[in-house]
Image (tube, rainbow, N blue to C red):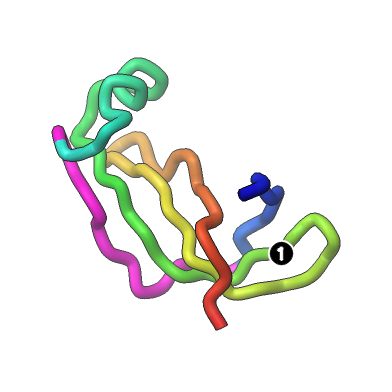
Amino acid sequence: MNVAAFRLISELESVETIAEGSAIRNLYRLNKAYGRAHWRKRKGIGMIELENGSIRRAELHWYEAHGIGRKELKFKHYVD
């Protein structure tokens, strides 16, 4: 899958935690890049604007931790 550049233009809805703590594969890298914290991998649905100007509803995944915030927002697939 090609990495699409996008901009989040709505609040995220249907947010749920996929993994947390030691269940996250990239935990060592997250701690090294952003600082030690209780990390959670989360997913949700939001409206995104693509580079070409089109607006789509999509499932997004990201990592977040208290005091650090949301990091590495990734597009997974469109939701119709």
**Stretch in magenta:** 10-22
Identify whether 29 is placed above or below 65.
above
Identify whether 67 is placed above or below 70.
above
Identify whether 79 is placed above or below 8.
below
Instruction: Say which residue appears at 40% left-offset and 65% top-offset.
Output: 44
Quadrant for the C terminus in the image:
bottom right
Q: Dot 1: few (<14), some (14–19), or many (≥20) neighbours within 10 Å? A: some
Instruction: Say which residue appears at 24% left-offset and 37% top-offset.
Output: 24
Image position of 45 (left or right of 40) = right
Does residue 64 belong to the magenta stretch? no
Rendered location of residue 73, percent (x, y): 50, 47
Instruction: Say which residue appears at 72% left-offset and 72% top-offset.
Output: 55
Image position of 27 (left or right of 23) = right
Label the magenta part by its dominant secondary structure. strand
Instruction: Say which residue appears at 35% left-offset and 35% top-offset.
Output: 68
Look at mark 1 in the image and give the residue it sits on: 49
Identify whether 52 is placed above or below 56.
above
Image position of 1 (left or right of 13) = right
Does residue 13 belong to the magenta stretch? yes
Q: Quadrant of residue 33?
A: top left
